Every structure is written in structure tokens, then in C-alpha cells.
Amino acid sequence: MGLKASFSNLKFECGTDEAGRGCIAGPVTAAAVILPDFFNNSILNDSKQLSENTRNLLKPIIEQNALAHAHCHVFPNEIDQINILNASILAMHKSIQQLTISPEYIIVDGNRFKPYNDIPYETIIKGDSKYLSIAAASVLAKTQRDFYMEHIHHEYPMYNWKQNKGYPTKEHREAIKKYGITPYHRKSFRLLPDQLKLEL
């Protein structure tokens, strides 16, 4: 059972998804993708179901074949101001805004979204494992975010973001206990399980 090509049957349907909502460091990253009618790929799926190598293999295929694609990072200072849900939706809106084709319809992974420019939309739970364009957006969001986390890893190697990508692993939390926080940490998040009187 392959992923479906379209929800609305309109020509310019855009899929959008985000990566990094559950992280305690780094941006939340969204992508938006409009695929052509003929696009098909038997490997493409929800990015969480794919290995890093497979995602990196799919990224250029999606970018070369998409009618339009874009991504956007929303950084920790803004996440702390507006909360992670609003930051995720903002990143999706900004991705859609950057598309070179204005979508006729938007399909969104998950169950929360805010209207964008009066374009009709549908939220779809587990949409990234049901529709090709959302799966493609999930791959682009995840690969772009991972690339960013690997880049800032060199600035603060002690947190091992190259490996954990900013997720709250035991190792990441031990490093916060030992070294404190960086400008890339989300101060509004529970950075340590018991907070351990962390000076923010």
C-alpha cells in the first residue's frame, strides 16, 4: 500500500510538516512541498520511519522533482516567546510563504494548524505516512534540521548534538548539568527532569 498522491485532487496541493518539536535545543524546522502529479517513490515515507542514510538519499530526489519546495527554521528565542506549537505553525507558514508556486490547497501533518492566506487546508493525523507531499516535507524538514544541528555541534561539541540532534537524551542532560546551557537551548522547556536548580 503506497502513499497517496493527493487529498484534494487540485494541481498545486502543498504538504507541510515539521521536525524538532520535542527537542530541548536548536530550532523547530518545517518544510513545504508541492509535488507533480506523476511523482512516485516506493521508499518515501514518514521521515521517522527512515534511516538517516535513506533520508539523505531522498532529499535531492525530492528537491529535483518537486514543483516547489522550501524550509524554515524558527529559533529558540522565538520558541520561548510564542511556545512550541505556535513556533511549529509559524515555521510551516513561513515555508509555504517561500514557495515559488502559491498552493491551492494545504495538507498538514498532525491536528493543529492556523489558516494561511485563506487557502483551504486539512490537518491529517499521521499524514506523513499517508500522503507523498507530507512525507516529502517531513524528510526535508528533518534533513535540514539535522544539518543545522551538525553545524552548531562544532561550536558546542560537549552536548553531542551531532548525535542527539538536540533531543533530551541522558547524555545531553548530563552535559547540561555539567556545562549549563547555551544560546541554542530552549529556556521555556524542562531542560532537566527535576530542574536541579538550573540557573537560567
Image (cartoon, rainbow, N blue to C red):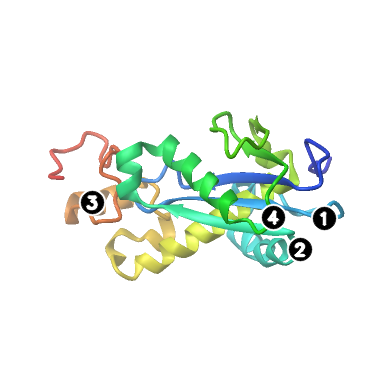
Q: Position of residue 127 (x, y in %)?
A: 67, 37
Circle 3 packing at 10 Å, graded few (<14), some (14-19), many (20+), is some
Q: Secondary structure at mark 3?
A: helix
Please name the residue that numbered disc 2 is placed on: 65
Q: Quadrant of the N terminus?
A: top right
How many other residues sit within 10 Å of disc 2, few (<14), some (14-19) or many (≥20)? Answer: some
For marks 4 and 1, give the one nearer the viewer: 4
Label 4 crowd bin: few (<14), some (14–19), many (20+), radius 10 Å: some
* Residues under numbered marks 4 and 1 in contact, where contact means CB atoms less than 8 Å apart: no
Mark sitting on residue 39: 1
Of badges 2 and 3, nearer the viewer stands 2
Residue at image mark 4: 101
Give the Cα distance between marks 4 and 3.
Answer: 43 Å
CA–CA distance in space, label 4 to label 1: 17 Å
Q: Residue at coordinates 55% horizontally, 56% vertically from top-left?
A: 71
Residue 170 visible in the displayed image: no
The answer to whether the residues at label 2 and label 3 have Cβ atoms under 8 Å apart is no
Residue 44 lies, with reference to residue 195, above or below; the image says below
Q: Is residue 186 above or below residue 143?
A: above
Q: Amino acid at mark 3?
A: Ile
The answer to which image quadrant residue 187 occupies is top left
- The residue labelled by disc 3 is 176
Amino acid on which the number 1 mark rests in the picture: Phe
Mark 4 or 3, which is nearer the eye?
A: 4
Secondary structure beneath label 4: loop
N-terminal label among 3 and 1: 1
**Circle 1 sits in a helix, a strand or a loop, which is it?**
loop
Q: Disc 4 or 3, which lies upstream in sequence?
A: 4
Q: Is residue 169 left or right of residue 120?
A: left
